Image: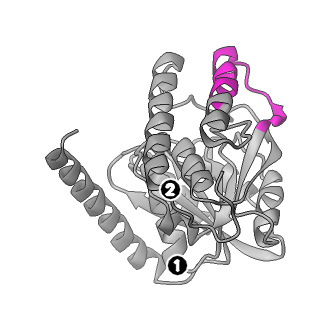
Amino acid sequence: MNARQARRARATDDLIDHVALEELAVAHGGRLLEPVAIVIAAYKEADTIESVVKAMPSEIEGLATSVVVVVDGEDDGTSGIVRNAGQVAVIAPVNRGQGAALRLGYRVAREYGARFIVTADADGQSDPDDLAAALRPVVAGEADFVNGSRRLGETYGTDTVRNAGVLCYAVLVSLLTRTRVTDTANPIRAFRSALTGNLTLEEPQYQASELLIAAIMSGCRFAEIPVTMRERAAGSSKKGGNLLYGLRYGRVVLRTWHRERARRRNLCSGGARP
């Protein structure tokens, strides 16, 4: 992508975000979120989203929560299901990818007053009971960025190629960042909402590794906690076949590492740079 194409892409992203935020302002009435925003990206998850939203805790570590579901291209009624359940739906009119959806969700969390963010999947693979364990070290001031790990906990995924990929990329990211990481693509993460406004997040799809690497290489105190990865409640993955997914994911890992290595910044006052 050349510079002109990059500018056009950013302008398009800004326009989509603007439309989503304007619709949210009308629908939500400008009300502030609770201290903890549980941010979920959803694309064609109408079959699972109601059960996922209703399973989310109303309180974590003594702090009330708001569930923020970013609907990445609304065409199946997901947003109505979320709002009927009493939670926040942010509607991106165009499907861009999980990374762009989460980035928008982080912005909503910041601008609507949430102090902390925890993330989960829309497909039912995340165990809501793990969210408290992820957020606890952040609230206690012991960590800046907490990542869930199926390898430290349990996984019910039976795709041996995908499971092998989790191991391979964990080894690669550990070597690149000089920080022990056991699961680079886990849906459960926790951090202060302000952090996401300071990190560079550009990837439209495979943003889990970008966020992880950017946080570690910006000096954030990093921790992992064991979590359970369940099988999808319904439907199938939207990320494509294993080979294509693995190649694209690896490209994001290397691109992010190269970018952050060149910057050498320290955004988390409590962290020491690897």
In the rendered image of this protein, does residue 34 appear above or below residue 151?
below
From the image, tell me which residue sits under label 1: 112
Q: Is residue 250 left or right of residue 74?
A: right
- State the SS at label 1: loop
Q: Amino acid at mark 2?
A: Arg
Q: Where residue 264 is drawn, which disc sits there?
A: 2
Q: Nearer the viewer, residue 47 or 123?
A: 123
Percent across and percent down for residue 123 are 63, 41
Q: CA distance from mark 1 to mark 2?
A: 30 Å
Q: Amino acid at mark 1?
A: Tyr
Among numbered discs 1 and 2, the one appearing first in the sequence: 1
Q: Nearer the viewer, residue 232 or 151?
A: 151
Which residue occupies 48% across, 50% down? 260
Which residue occupies 50% across, 17% down? 243
Answer whether residue 37 is magenta in the image. Answer: no
> How crowded is the residue under tag 2: few (<14 C-alpha within 10 Å), some, or many (20+)?
few
In the rendered image of this protein, does residue 196 appear above or below residue 31?
above
Magenta span of residues: 150-169
Percent across and percent down for residue 121 are 63, 46
Percent across and percent down for residue 40 are 58, 54
In the rendered image of this protein, does residue 62 appear above or below residue 51?
below
The reply to whether residue 77 is visible in this rendering is: no
